[in-house]
Every structure is written in structure tokens, then in C-alpha cells.
Image (spheres, rainbow, N blue to C red):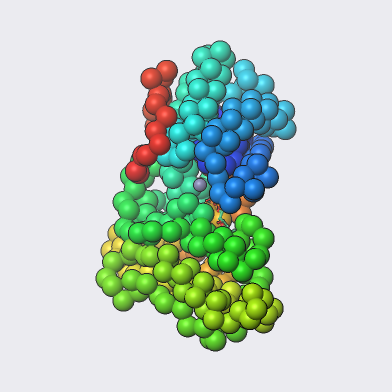
């Protein structure tokens, strides 16, 4: 039997991550997946501060890598390659990761493979479910929102996406408007479960326009206006808050599900067998349920990887690196860290 072991490294946003992936006769197993999040460092600033993120990555990459190797029981000499996110993302973090990976690869005499972070997300259903090409991917996170037709490990076609905020960003901003904790998604979802989704009819921007583009910034503004209308003496009643969350989530779900249906219909002739999701927003139960329904209606599979592999992690980077490695692709010391890198 043939076995390949890859160390994956990720540092493009606010999570430092390292993972060891082993592929034996085509079957992948995540031996370890370590994620050090920086939420506590950025909490006071209301968003990710790039300089703080870069420093934290530089401080944590070696610790995470050592921990991942330790947990996997793997020595450096047992690795076949080092895969690292080379973009897109906050450049200080990406540079920290690329420089660390170069040092490690040179020191241990290992091949180096640079990976696109978005490709990491988009190929995850192949790691978790062995999904075959081609398939449709909906990537919905705090920073991204796009439909991708995935036809190969290096063959992605963007069908559309948000023209302003990402859905996770909208969930987080709405949580802030309603004095709910961060990250906003789970808090808003829990509130919404207690509320009436029909009381506030929030806008569904771009819904009736052709194509797969979406817009969410107006939705957030509408929630702000509705909140100010129902607030009394600066106070928001619990039932009002729940109804606002329910109305917001209903609009969000409606847009994502209808646009996903449109994207599926657009690629209907391409031989796809599944709609797959990735990103933190894929954790949302009503959104998941809506996506599952449109798949069932069309006789397609709906693939939602476990949440720990949907959000930022290094196992997905190791997998995407493996797909490149297997195809004979390698990088060298000229590998560049790229703040922008469309698929
Ligand atoms: O994939 P992720 O970890 O990547 C980014 O950092 O972008 O996604 C995080 C985002 C946050 O905005 C969070 O509020 C959202 O995913 N999220 C959710 C839920 N759980 C996490 N949004 C809606 N419903 C949820 N249950
Ligand atoms: Zn990501």
C-alpha cells in the first residue's frame, strides 16, 4: 500500500492552524487538526486588526505545527510534503505562513506546495465525502460568499457571489446591532428560533435579478431601521429582538436558497451530482435545511462537511496540497504570498 503524509499550514485570516493528513490507497485520514483562534485578541476592536493578526500568526505557527505533529505521532522525517496557504488573505499572516513553510521545507528537505485558501474550502467535500468532480460549491463564511463550479482541483468557475457583505459578516453585524455576543451567527440563530419570521418583512436584494449575485448590506441597514422603530427609551424587548432575528434569518435563508437553486439550474447540463457547502454560515440549521430541500427536489446530493472542516482549518489546506502534490505540482523558494488570488 502507498501512503502520503502531508503537513498543512493556514494563517490567512484570524486562525492559526496546522494539521497532519495521511492518505493511504486513496483514503484520507486527518491525523490531527490544531486551530488557535485569535478572537480574544481582536474582540476589543470590533474586527480583525491585520497587524495584531500577523504578529499572533508569527508567534503561533511553530507551536501549532509542533502540536499537530505531536498529536499525529508523526516526525518531520515521516512527512512527504508541506502545504501552506499562499493567499488570498491578510498579507502579514500569509507571509508568516509562507516563510515558516519555506524554512521547514528547506530544513527538513521536503517538497513545498502553495495552496489557494479558497481552493482549500472548495475541495473539502472531497476530503470528507470523497465527492467526485464536477460539483457545485456554495462557500459562505464571514469573509466569503460565492458559487463555484468545481470541475478539477485547479479548475473553478465562479458563477456569482456577494457584491458587498458576506453572510457571516451580516450575521455578526446584526448581532452587534442587537447587543448579542460574537460570533453573531449562532447567537442570531438561537434568538431567531424564539421569534416570528413573518413580523418584519426585510428586503431580498437582487432576488428578482437574473444571475447568481447577491447583496446583503441593505438587509443589515433594514434591521437597524426596524430596531430603532421598536426600541423604547433605548431599550429593546426580548420578543422584539427575537422577531428581528427571525425576520433577518428568513430573508438571508430565502436569498441563499433561491440563488443556490438558480446556480444549480444554470449548471444542470454539466453533469454535477451534488451541491456542497463550506464556511461557518453552513452551520445554520434553516439555511442547511433549505439547501437540502432544493437538492432533494433535483435528485442531487447535499454535502455539508463537519463544521470543524467547514470553518478555517489546516486539514483542508493539506488536502488541497495533496491534490496538487499527487499531480506532480511543487513550489520552491520563489513561492509568493498573495493578498489577492482569484481562483
Ligand atoms: O468559516 P468561518 O469560520 O470563516 C471566517 O472567519 O470567515 O465563518 C465564520 C462566520 C462568522 O461570521 C459566524 O457568525 C458565522 O460564520 N456563523 C454562522 C453560524 N455559525 C457561524 N452564521 C449563521 N448561523 C450560524 N449558526
Ligand atoms: Zn476561510
Front residue (pair 82, 57): 57
Q: Which residue is drawn at 59% across and 41% down?
A: 15
Instruction: Answer above or below: position of 170 versus 342.
Output: below
Q: Is residue 257 at least partly visible in the picture?
A: no
Image x and y of residue 141, in percent:
50, 55
Q: Residue furthest bottom?
A: 199
Q: In this view, does 228 lie to the left or right of 269?
A: right
Residue at 52%, 38% (x, y): give it.
50
> Residue at horizontal 55%, vertical 76%?
228
Looking at this view, is 162 or 294 the one in front? 162
Q: Position of residue 315 (x, y in %)?
A: 57, 40
> Residue at point 28% right, 66% down?
211
Closest to the observer, 4 or 261:
261
Location of residue 305 in the rendering, given as x and y in whole percent from the top left corner: 56, 55
In the visual, does 121 lie left or right of 191?
left
Residue 214: give x, y in percent of width and height.
Answer: 37, 65
Q: Is residue 232 above or below residue 331?
A: below
Work out which quarter of the rendered image holds the C terminus and state it. top left
Residue 281 sits in quarter: bottom right
Marker count (numbered): 0
Q: Can residue 143 be seen in this snapshot?
A: yes
Q: In which quarter of the image is residue 59?
A: top right
User: In which quarter of the view is residue 165 placed?
Assistant: bottom left
159 relative to 131 in the view: left or right: left
Amino acid at each position: 500500500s502507498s501512503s502520503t503524509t502531508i503537513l498543512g499550514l493556514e494563517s490567512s485570516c484570524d486562525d492559526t492552524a496546522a494539521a497532519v493528513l495521511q492518505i493511504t490507497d486513496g483514503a484520507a485520514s486527518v491525523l490531527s487538526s490544531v486551530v488557535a483562534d485569535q478572537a480574544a485578541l481582536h474582540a476589543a476592536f470590533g474586527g480583525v486588526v491585520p497587524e495584531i493578526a500577523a504578529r499572533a500568526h508569527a508567534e503561533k505557527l511553530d507551536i501549532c505545527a509542533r502540536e499537530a505533529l505531536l498529536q499525529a505521532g508523526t516526525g518531520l522525517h515521516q512527512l512527504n510534503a508541506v502545504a501552506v496557504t499562499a493567499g488570498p488573505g491578510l498579507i502579514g499572516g500569509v507571509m508568516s505562513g509562507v516563510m515558516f513553510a519555506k524554512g521547514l521545507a528547506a530544513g527538513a528537505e521536503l517538497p513545498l506546495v502553495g495552496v489557494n485558501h479558497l481552493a482549500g474550502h472548495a475541495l473539502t467535500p472531497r476530503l470528507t465525502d470523497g465527492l467526485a468532480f464536477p460539483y457545485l460549491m456554495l462557500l459562505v463564511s464571514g469573509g466569503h460568499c460565492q458559487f463555484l463550479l468545481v470541475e478539477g482541483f485547479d479548475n473553478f468557475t465562479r458563477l456569482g457571489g456577494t457584491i458587498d457583505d458576506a453572510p457571516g459578516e451580516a450575521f455578526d453585524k446584526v448581532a452587534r446591532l442587537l447587543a448579542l455576543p460574537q460570533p453573531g451567527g449562532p447567537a442570531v440563530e438561537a434568538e431567531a428560533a424564539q421569534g416570528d419570521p413573518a413580523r418584519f418583512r426585510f428586503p431580498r436584494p437582487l432576488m428578482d435579478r437574473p444571475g447568481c449575485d447577491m447583496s446583503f448590506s441593505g438587509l443589515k441597514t433594514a434591521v437597524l431601521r426596524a430596531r430603532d422603530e421598536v426600541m423604547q427609551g433605548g431599550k429593546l424587548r426580548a420578543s422584539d429582538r427575537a422577531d428581528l432575528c427571525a425576520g433577518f434569518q428568513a430573508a438571508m435563508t430565502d436569498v441563499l436558497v433561491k440563488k443556490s437553486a438558480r446556480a444549480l439550474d444554470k449548471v444542470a447540463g454539466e453533469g454535477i451530482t451534488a451541491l456542497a457547502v463550506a464556511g461557518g454560515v453552513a452551520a445554520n440549521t434553516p439555511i442547511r435545511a433549505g439547501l437540502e430541500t432544493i437538492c432533494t427536489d433535483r435528485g442531487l446530493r447535499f454535502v455539508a462537511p463537519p463544521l470543524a472542516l467547514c470553518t478555517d482549518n489546516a486539514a483542508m489546506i493539506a488536502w488541497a496540497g495533496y491534490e496538487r502534490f499527487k499531480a506532480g505540482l511543487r513550489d520552491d523558494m520563489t513561492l509568493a504570498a498573495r493578498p489577492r488570488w482569484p481562483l
